[in-house]
Amino acid sequence: MLDILKINSHHTYVMKNVTTIVSFAGLLTVSCFNNAGSNNLQNAIQENIVQSPVLYLVNYNTAGVDGTWLTSDDVISSYGEYIYDTNGNIEYIMFHNTPGADGIWMSTDDVATFCQEFTYDINGNLTRWTSYNNNGADWEWHTADDRVSTYREYSYAANGDLQYEVFYPTAGTDAIWFTADDPFNGYEKSIFDGNGNLIQFITYVGAGADATWYTADDVVNIYYNQIFNANNKVVYQNRMTGPGADTVWLNGDDVMQFYSESQYNANDKKKYYTIYTASGPDATWFTADDTFSTTHGYTYDTNGDLLYKSTYSNAGVDGTWYTSDDTVASLVEYLY
């Protein structure tokens, strides 16, 4: 694997000095950050998997010529580079899909294909996330002519909990980003329990019949429920995509699309993350015959930091999941 010097210093819900982004599915995404790169890290922080500051998050898509994972010929597909501010918050994530002219990944000539920027208030709360898809005419990132593709803004309740995440897809009629005429096309509302756990987040995509946002008739698109264990760790997360037969959202007959289950090791670190995409022959969710889709496994170092996230494609020769012969389909490496 890559020989990178490690340093010791350390899905959407935000805490002081830690950006934690809640995302349900896949590599490097967030409820709002939709790209292979950022979300693995964010989920890892949220679940207390990563405790040191990650420098690179590296995606491998094949095991190389030798067919064996975690050897020097594993094939990199992309990586994210994490840049921190003086308070230890993530300031930028730079995404790289090619290794540059020298053909060597993570060297000085690698050219980022796009960038995400994180902006905070004086309390360390995330206030804006911005995605840039081009570094502008000067060909330099982090300058005034970088081209914005979208951004999101965050607001908080009096107790500090994240309340709203608002989506801005365009710059408005003045063609200038971050001005008052930027139209938003929806928002996400976060709901917490008494322990500060994010138990539900709801995406609204329309202002409803009254044409006024943040009112009771706003149009729901999807929502997620999260169920926690006694240690305040997420055990189940389900994605609800329809209002059910009664056509009313946020009640018992809403339609589930899929759910995830998280399992933890003796140190309360996430060990497996599994997605179920159908309720099985009994047509009842959360029973033994639910259709198993994908699982991810997590490997840690002696300090408890996440080293690898493995995605498994099948249960191997023994036909049993969560055993040593499960087939790895892809791998993400965390470099500190």
Image (cartoon, helix red, strand yellow):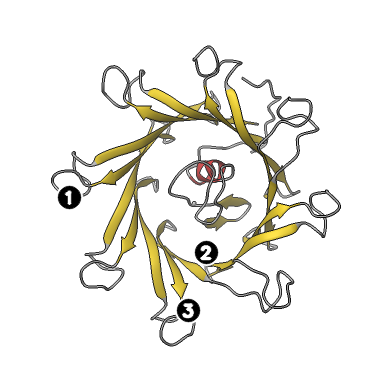
Mark 3 or mark 1, earlier in chain: 3
Mark 2 or mark 3, earlier in chain: 2
Tag count: 3
The amino acid sitting under disc 2 is Leu
Badge 1 is on which residue?
Answer: 284
Badge 2 is on which residue?
Answer: 162
Q: Is residue 26 above or below residue 129?
A: above
The amino acid sitting under disc 1 is Thr
**The one of 171 and 33 positioned closer to us in this rendering:** 171
Give the spatial CA distance, label 2 vs label 3. 15 Å
Element class at badge 1: loop
Residue at image x 44%, y 35%?
Answer: 269
Give the spatial CA distance, label 3 vs label 1. 34 Å
Q: Position of residue 167 (x, y in %)?
A: 56, 66
Give the spatial CA distance, label 2 vs label 1. 33 Å
Mark 2 or mark 1, earlier in chain: 2
- Badge 2: how crowded within 10 Å, few (<14), some, or many (20+)? many
* Discs 2/3, front: 3
Q: Position of residue 276 (x, y in %)?
A: 30, 43
Badge 3 is on which residue?
Answer: 214
Name the image quarter holding the N terminus.
top right
On the question of residue 229 being in view, the answer is no
Residue at image x 63%, y 36%?
Answer: 79
Q: Is residue 270 above or below residue 315?
A: below
Q: Is residue 97 left or right of residue 186?
A: right
Q: Position of residue 166 (x, y in %)?
A: 55, 68
Q: Position of residue 186 (x, y in %)?
A: 51, 70
Residue at image x 41%, y 36%?
Answer: 268
**The one of 165 and 303 positioned closer to us in this rendering:** 165
* Discs 2/1, front: 1
